[in-house]
């Protein structure tokens, strides 16, 4: 099976605090997954689970503490950025932070075409840029000479996608690409991702906390919690029949129009996040309704449960303490 991207045992640690009171947090802990050609693979989880850290290391923005990353079977180089050497492009959460407000948006496109030597003349450059813009429902005439503040958030995010497409990438890493876009526009962007996969064969690493769009757009999904992938499989397997207690909690936490359901905890989210990252054994044990004594001291193994990877003691010895269906 071809693997466009292969991440194995990726670990990233950060030190916090002073020299005398230093705390080491493992933001990504032996993260392992792969992405096939023409596939949308989702990393999902709540804020602070390690999704963005994983993306930064894969892109080469940060260096892994340990582990390996292969692009088209070749190891990620330390000196050259992967989007230059291996056809990888990125789309970020806030489209307004992607562009300098004092520069016209078309200048970024022309700069990319020039740097990659993708056209022999200005006319060819404009034709190439217009072709990519039309893939996202825009045209060169609509955006030439304009500044970022002259576009809506949804338009600017589609322009970001078109900019990523200028180099004909094989893989796009999209970090929360619809979280700052109006709900009415989210589906147009995720439909665009599906079109890129189906029509152009582009693979996408889709990073999100939005399980609804993850289910709609994704092929396979990995659920992350405090640096660990706790469940991984097809979106149907994981989201329609979640095995891991955290996956169930995440799915059940999708907001509902019910004023009687309110958040009542007084615990600081920052304190909770640090406590869970530093916890021995299963990091979800403090919140897990099915936690056992072993969960508080022993890290669970990655188990195959009906073709789904599950990191949970409940499924040790090939059985569960409850019916996962």
Image: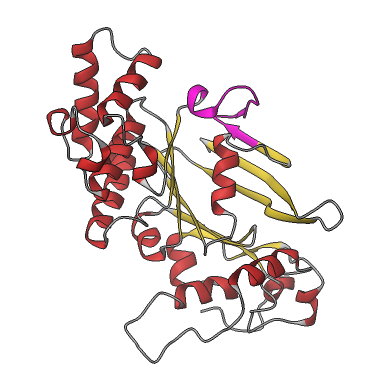
Q: Residue at x 42, y 64 (%)?
A: 236
Query: What residue is drawn where x is 37% and y is 36%?
Result: 202
Q: Is residue 30 magenta?
A: no
Q: Horizontal and vertical percent for residue 231?
A: 58, 63
Q: Over which residues does the magenta segment extend? A: 69-85
Q: Please count the marks in the image.
A: 0
In the displayed structure, does residue 307 sit left or right of residue 296?
left
Residue positioned 38% across, 39% down in the render: 98
Extreme residue in the right direction: 20
x then y, percent, for residue 21:
83, 58
236 up-or-down from 15: above or below: below
- Asked whether residue 189 appears in the rendered view, the answer is yes
Magenta segment: does it hold 81?
yes
Above or below — where is 25 with respect to 111? below
The quarter of the displayed image where residue 225 is located: bottom right
Instruction: Tell me: 274 left or right of 193.
Output: right
Colour scheme shown:
secondary structure
Q: Is residue 281 above or below residue 263?
A: above
Q: Is residue 221 left or right of residue 112?
A: right
Determine the residue positioned at 36% across, 33% down.
164
Residue 271 position within the rendered picture, expressed as x and y whole percent measured from the top left: 66, 70
Work out whether residue 36 or residue 151 is closer to the camera in this orientation and state it. 151
């Amino acid at each position: 099976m071809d693997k466009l991207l292969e991440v194995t045992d990726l670990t990233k640690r950060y030190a916090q605090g002073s020299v005398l009171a230093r705390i080491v947090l493992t933001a990504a802990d032996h993260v392992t997954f792969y992405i096939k050609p023409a596939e949308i693979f989702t990393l999902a989880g709540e804020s602070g689970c390690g999704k963005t850290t994983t993306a930064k290391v894969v892109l080469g923005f940060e260096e892994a503490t340990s582990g390996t990353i292969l692009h088209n079977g070749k190891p990620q180089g330390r000196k050259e950025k992967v989007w230059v050497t291996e056809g990888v492009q990125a789309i970020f959460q806030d489209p307004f932070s992607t562009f300098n407000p004092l520069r016209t948006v078309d200048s970024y496109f022309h700069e990319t075409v020039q740097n990659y030597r993708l056209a022999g003349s200005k006319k060819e450059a404009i034709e190439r840029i217009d072709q990519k813009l039309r893939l996202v429902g825009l045209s060169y005439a609509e955006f030439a000479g304009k500044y970022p503040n002259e576009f809506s958030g949804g338009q600017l995010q589609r322009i970001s996608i078109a900019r990523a497409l200028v180099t004909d990438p094989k893989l796009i890493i999209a970090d929360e690409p619809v979280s700052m876009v109006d709900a009415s526009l989210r589906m147009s962007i995720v439909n665009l991702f599906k079109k890129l996969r189906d029509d152009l064969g582009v693979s996408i690493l889709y990073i999100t906390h939005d399980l609804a769009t993850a289910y709609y757009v994704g092929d396979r999904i990995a659920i992350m919690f405090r640096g660990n992938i706790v469940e991984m499989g097809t979106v149907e397997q994981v989201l329609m029949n979640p095995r891991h207690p955290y996956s169930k909690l995440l799915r059940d936490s999708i907001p509902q129009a019910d004023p009687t359901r309110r958040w009542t905890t007084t615990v600081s989210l920052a304190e909770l996040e640090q406590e869970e990252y530093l916890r021995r054994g299963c990091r979800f044990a403090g919140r897990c309704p099915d936690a056992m004594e072993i969960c508080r001291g022993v890290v669970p193994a990655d188990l195959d449960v009906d073709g789904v990877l599950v990191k949970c003691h409940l499924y040790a010895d090939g059985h569960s303490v409850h019916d996962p269906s």
